[in-house]
Amino acid sequence: MTPEKLGRQLRQQRQSLGLTLEECARRTGLSLRLLSEMERGKEGVSIGRVVRYADSLGMDLQARPGEAARVDVERFPELKLLAWQRPGQRFLDERDALALYEANWRFVDSQHLIPREAELIRQLSQRHGAGVLNV
């Protein structure tokens, strides 16, 4: 779930109920500007305010684990070589892919990484390694 997607859902629900932003502002006690920002997916809005707005629209927000992003081993030559012990496993969870790179970096030909794979490693270290590749 992204702020933009949640914002679209809030707007769709409000519109399906035939409500204007002004009516929702009066109902919730939240400013018109804040409601507009929520519906546009602006970040930085407190969760309490989002929940209050969603509740006023009859929406039940639930937190649940999302599906982990997957990496297609076949698209990345060095990763494919590192994943030899996982025959038949074409897709890896992003965290597993990063762990494979980190644990086996000495076997990676880093001078000849294709640009797509170099970018994957950078993204994985940003998302799951606090910006650091632990090698």
Image (cartoon, helix red, strand yellow):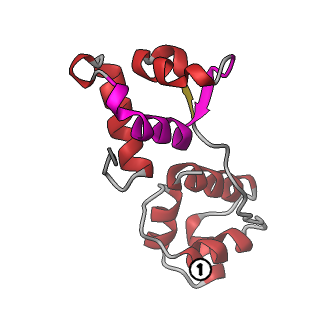
Q: Nearest the camera: 65 or 62? A: 65
Q: Is residue 121 left or right of residue 93?
A: left
Residue that label 1 marks:
48
Q: Quadrant of the C terminus?
A: top left
Q: Which residue is located at x 44 percent, y 40 percent?
A: 103
- Residue 31 on image: x %, y %: 48, 78
Q: Which residue is located at x 60 percent, y 31 percent?
A: 92
Q: Which residue is located at x 69 percent, y 17 percent?
A: 88
- Residue 93 on image: x %, y %: 59, 37
Residue type at mark 1?
Gly
Q: Using the image, determine if residue 106 lies above or below residue 23.
A: above
Bounds of the magenta span? 88-108
Q: Using the image, determine if residue 63 lies above or below residue 23.
A: above
Secondary structure mostly seen in magenta is: helix
Q: Using the image, determine if residue 32 lies above or below residue 19.
A: below
- Residue 28 on image: x %, y %: 63, 81
- Number of numbered labels in the structure image: 1
* The quarter of the displayed image where residue 24 is located: bottom right
> Within 10 Å of the Cα at label 1, are there few (<14), some (14-19), or many (20+) other Cα atoms?
few
Q: Nearest the camera: 113 or 42? A: 113
- Residue 126 on image: x %, y %: 36, 48
Q: Is residue 113 left or right of residue 41?
A: left
Q: Nearest the camera: 125 or 9? A: 125
